């Protein structure tokens, strides 16, 4: 966002999905690298050059590297030779003279560690469990059975190869993406899958995971660009592996996944169109995970495909 002041712009490398607010000043003689997904607030200054103390006519330059998904607050100054780690946050007005570790927040002059950003924490679980309690005041969960897997539906434990099925009257349908996630780095288990784990701790449910036949890109910005540039404009219907044939056996259906560009991934449209009418008379509990785009449109999307024949509770987002 203009105005910008950049010296030696040829020495700068800027990744995809970078947001720059107004009045950025870059003295880039020593080289500046800004990785994918970085956010830079207004009036930020990045300075790679310095003067020699003995001979102040001599210019000494060192590169600055800002890692993926870092957030540089308003008025911050980043001096020569500094590396800002992935997902780090530099507070407003900070003067950064030393490297900043990934997943940390620094502030002050000179900048010092304020706290470490936890990849997953009790906060998400506490919020989610509170929401689950509210849901349970509306829907009642039936007792489970010990029947084996039926029609492609298993418990989360059984999907992981640990055996035992759960109750049949409540079902979780979800999609989750592992790989690089916003502000948490690379994860082996997606954020939505973690929410499903919390549901299973609290309620007796079966689980059906929507697994794309062609996986979404594991790189965060590549995935965002694919959704923005391909999936949404082309109104795609991505195929998924396997299916569930016994939705009629369940009374309560949890439906959840990530929220991309303010809406559910289009693979849910594939699922809803394949199972048109099968959520009628069900109680549907939507949930979603996002990195800042808000709750999205899970509730409205479900009502679009199943009006007005199912009860859709207020959605929750983490």
Image (cartoon, helix red, strand yellow):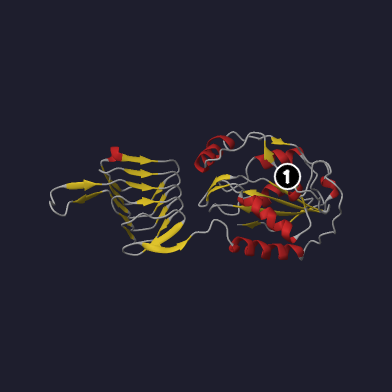
Classify mark 1: helix, strand or loop. Answer: helix
Can you give x and y, in whole percent of width and height, for residue 192 in the image?
Answer: 64, 51
* For residue 195, above or below residue 8: below
Q: Is residue 108 visible?
A: yes
Image mark count: 1
Q: Quadrant of the C terminus?
A: bottom right
Q: What residue is drawn where x is 60% and y is 54%?
A: 295
Q: Is residue 1 visible?
A: no
For this rendering, which residue is in front, 28 or 303? Answer: 28
Can you give x and y, in whole percent of width and height, for residue 133 in the image?
Answer: 72, 65
For this rendering, which residue is in front, 167 or 160? Answer: 160
Can you give x and y, in whole percent of width and height, for residue 290 in the image?
Answer: 57, 52
Q: What residue is drawn where x is 13% and y is 52%?
A: 56
Q: Which residue is mark 1?
A: 305
Give the side of residue 292 with respect to residue 57, left or right.
Answer: right
Give the side of residue 272 with respect to residue 21, left or right.
Answer: right
Give the side of residue 57 with respect to residue 78, left or right.
Answer: left
Location of residue 119 (image quadrant): bottom right
Disc 1 packing (10 Å; few <14; some 14–19; many ≥20): some
Can you give x and y, in whole percent of width and height, for residue 17 in the image?
Answer: 45, 43
Q: What residue is drawn where x is 77% and y is 40%?
A: 275
């Amino acid at each position: 966002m203009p105005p910008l002041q950049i010296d030696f712009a040829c020495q700068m490398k800027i990744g995809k999905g970078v947001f720059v607010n107004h009045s950025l000043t870059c003295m880039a003689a020593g080289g500046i690298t800004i990785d994918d997904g970085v956010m830079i607030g207004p009036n930020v200054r990045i300075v790679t050059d310095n003067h020699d103390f003995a001979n102040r006519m001599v210019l000494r330059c060192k590169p600055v590297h800002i890692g993926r998904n870092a957030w540089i607050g308003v008025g911050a100054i980043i001096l020569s030779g500094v590396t800002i780690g992935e997902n780090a946050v530099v507070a407003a007005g900070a003067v950064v003279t030393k490297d900043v570790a990934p997943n940390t927040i620094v502030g002050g002059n000179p900048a010092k560690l304020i706290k470490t950003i936890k990849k997953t924490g009790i906060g998400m679980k506490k919020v989610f469990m509170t929401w689950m309690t509210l849901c349970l005041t509306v829907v009642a969960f039936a007792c489970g059975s010990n029947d084996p897997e039926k029609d492609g539906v298993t418990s989360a434990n059984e999907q992981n190869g640990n055996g035992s099925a759960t109750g049949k009257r409540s079902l979780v349908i979800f999609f989750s993406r592992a790989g690089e996630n916003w502000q948490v780095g690379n994860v082996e288990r997606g954020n939505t899958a973690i929410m499903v784990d919390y549901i299973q701790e609290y309620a007796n449910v079966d689980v059906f995971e929507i697994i794309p036949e062609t996986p979404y890109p594991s790189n965060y910005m590549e995935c965002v660009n694919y959704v923005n540039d391909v999936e949404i404009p082309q109104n795609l219907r991505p195929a998924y592996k396997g299916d569930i044939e016994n939705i009629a056996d369940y009374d309560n259906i949890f439906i959840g996944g990530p929220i991309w560009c303010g809406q559910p991934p289009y693979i849910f449209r594939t699922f809803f169109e394949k199972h048109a009418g099968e959520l009628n008379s069900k109680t549907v509990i939507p949930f979603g995970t996002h990195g800042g785009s808000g709750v999205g449109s899970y509730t409205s999307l479900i009502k679009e495909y199943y009006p007005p024949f199912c009860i859709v509770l207020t959605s929750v987002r983490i």
